[in-house]
Amino acid sequence: MVKQTIQIFARVKPPVRKHQQGIYSIDEDEKLIPSLEIILPRDLADGFVNNKRESYKFKFQRIFDQDANQETIFENIAKPVAGSVLEGYNGTIFAYGQTGSGKTFTITGGAERYSDRGIIPRTLSYIFEQLQKDSSKMYTTHISYLEIYNECGYDLLDPRHEASSLEDLPKVTILEDPDQNIHLKNLTLHQATTEEEALNLLFLGDTNRMIAETPMNQASTRSHCIFTIHLSSKEPGSATVRHAKLHLVDLAGSERVAKTGVGGHLLTEAKYINLSLHYLEQVIIALSEKHRSHIPYRNSMMTSVLRDSLGGNCMTTMIATLSLEKRNLDESISTCRFAQRVALIKNEAVLNEEIDPRLMIKRLQKEIQELKDELAMVTGEQRTEALTEAELLQLEKLITSFLEDQDPESRLEVGADMRKVHHCFHHLKKLLNDKKIFGNNTVSNTVSSESKDQDCQEPLKEEEYRKLRDTLKQRDNEINILVNMLKKEKKKAQEALHLAGMDRREFRHSQSPPFPLGNPEEGQRMRLSSAPSQAQDFSTLGNRSSLLHKKTGMREEMSLGRQEAFEIFKRDHADSVTIDDNKQILKQRFSEAKALGESINEARSKIGHLKEEITQRHIQQVALGISENMAVPLMPDQQEEKLRSQLEEEKRRYKTMFTRLKALKVEIEHLQLLMDKAKVKLQKEFEVWWAEEATNLQVNSPAVNSLNHTKPFLQTSDSQHQQSQLFSNKSSGGWEVQGQGTGRFDVCDVNARKILPSPCPSPHSQKQSNTSTPLEDSIPKRPMSSIPLTGDSQTDSDILAFIKARQSILQKQCLGSN
Ligand code: ADP
Ligand code: MG
């Protein structure tokens, strides 16, 4: 058992703008516990300016400042936890902090760069690497991915559904057994035998999470996501199985309401937006207070699921993510206060060992056999299960003559064979009962005195028999219990299979790696010739989840008008830069992989040649020795030594290249998944944009027609006014500057890459602007139902024309203002 308090770490996010940075300092004296000091300006707290400042100091295990990269975070925080999970302990890492402080970035990673991958992909990589190295145990790995939103659990890994909202995903519910263990009904566990398979599952879950999110539910801010790696290990031949779970948790944003001031008093009174975080805090408070008998885990689904991680059988780590910009200082202080409480909680992690009933039965059967063999050694006879007919007859004869013998000293000798002893008793009982029926009890007297005699005369042997008999009986009972357990397990498994069976078949697709990794000794060939074409057509690679693929392949179903509009949307979308960049990187990686593959092939054939040459050289030397009548050449063969050192060098080169190729393979896989995800996001955002455009067309339809067909490029100030009305109406959808809050639409930035046509309507966009102009009022409006949003290619081309008209006006205006 390992007793440990929850470890707390802090990570400070770089500010979006330097000048917005608040004042803080990190004190990391080696001898002292690291501390973070946050300075809160008090000038506005009391409604008048004063220069008093308040300082808050918090202690953490370690504090990672803005420049700490993902690798450092993994090495220092996640790797030790992953290490204990590999040993068989449960582990949890959870990120806590306000929205935008870097929880998702820390747990899952950034959406753009491979180097930004977070704790989950790095942990998967580490765990699979360790499993490969350790041949002393057999491991199985399963993955589950749960999202909790509004007290409901959703299975993010269910491949059955094309989730377009959270409600489309299967609902996960909590069951509690009599021992108060929590079971999650409907949460599917997917076996992952390789890092790639696990990575696919992560991206499948993330894509489902993204698709299911709507601006209304703001799932990423308001929901908790729990990615769990379930690891079982067993030593060959042992009946003990170790189970360990690693929860990697991205909690909902911890921001609170009642944020009316920055004073300390108000901070404590502020309420969480997310109710389950309020319950989490209650659990934490209860756990950190001594002698509290009731811990309110049951109040929320999240605290129930994470029950073991909080004050239970788990090694738990918290990462407080902090955005120390001026406007976020109060939230950051709340986060740090929460962390200080969490640090008081003691957990007791134990090795989760379990007996595998099948293996136990095998082991007990073996023990029985050994006992039987021992018995055979003692008695000198080999025993079969039952006595033969002849033996039984012989015994009965013996009993009859024994009963008939008048000599009180006579004995019934059957030898040290329990089967015979039992049969004698059995037969005597039968005789006795028969006699009883005829009212004669003489036999019973004889028998009882006889058996007493036997008891006295052979106490040791009888004792031995009894022991053996008892052991056998006990083993039989144990086997019965275990068989029952097995039956139960089987039933459970069948039920689970029944639930998940069909989906798995659909989900498990052919998992062929982009290129097989070989080893020169096995003579496998690297097939890399198709690599560049794979890089170009990254959406058709077979090594990804069919669902992810399905989700990226929606475009073929679009009408031509929509496809063209999609191209326009994509061109101006900020993410297309990322996609293009990643495409470039991917191409480079593929070329590098191809070149490496070729070099590896070269190295392999060189190794082959060198080996051949050495063998030839050897044969020559032996032949020379024979012809000169010498068994072994006297001089060490310099030529051979040279060949050998060349061979060693070549092998080293091969190994280095091979390791690099393996790393490249993981990187390529990751980049492909990042791009798939970005494409799904783009598509989703396009759909929203398209629907908005359709509505705008409806509102402005006659205006567009006149703009587009009669007066395509109006230049008068009047018409410019009309155009800007048109835009303001459109842009009431709110155009967003990426990574920031909602910004107003800037006409001249339309072609600037970092401007994003708002995919998720901001609060303004959810209602259409009601401020109509006299011009608009005079336009007869098309009724809503007259424009279907999808499928009608005539309408689609109308919408496209509308988009294009606006585009050209925008361009004109940009040119005009420059
Ligand atoms: P949260 O999940 O807490 O709401 P995110 O992880 O989504 O926050 O982070 C918000 C933004 O800040 C994202 O664009 C993310 O890429 C960026 N970000 C967060 N942490 C860091 C960091 N340590 N370094 C660089 N960028 C970061
Ligand atoms: Mg997040």
Image (cartoon, grey):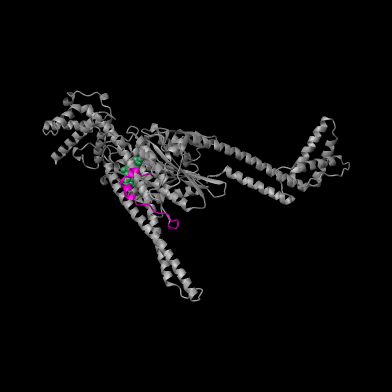
Identified at 49% across, 53% down, the residue is 134
Question: Could you say which is closer to the camera, residue 215 or residue 570?
Answer: 570
- On the image, which quarter does residue 556 sit in? top left
565 is higher (above) or lower (below) than 113: above
Q: Does the magenta-highlighted stretch encompass residue 748?
A: no
Query: In this view of the protein, can residue 470 be seen by the observer?
Result: yes
User: Residue 396 at x, y = what percent?
Assistant: 80, 40
**What count of labels does the image hold?**
0
Q: Quadrant of ligand 2?
A: top left
Query: In this view of the protein, can residue 38 be seen by the observer?
Result: no
> In the rendered view of the protein, which quadrant contains the C terminus?
top left
User: Residue 305 at x, y = what percent?
Assistant: 46, 37
User: Residue 311 at x, y = what percent?
Assistant: 48, 41
- Relative placement, left or right, of 468 versus 610 is right
User: Residue 309 at x, y = what percent?
Assistant: 47, 42
549 is higher (above) or lower (below) than 32: above
What's the magenta region?
520-542
- Relative placement, left or right, of 696 versus 535 is left
Question: Could you say which is closer to the camera, residue 164 or residue 95?
Answer: 164
- Relative placement, left or right, of 224 versus 722 is right
Looking at this view, name the residue that lies furthest to the right.
Answer: 406
Looking at this view, name the residue that lies furthest to the left.
Answer: 716
Question: Could you say which is closer to the camera, residue 108 or residue 32?
Answer: 108
Q: Does the magenta-highlighted stretch encompass residue 533?
A: yes
209 is higher (above) or lower (below) than 1: above
Question: Could you say which is closer to the camera, residue 541 or residue 270?
Answer: 541
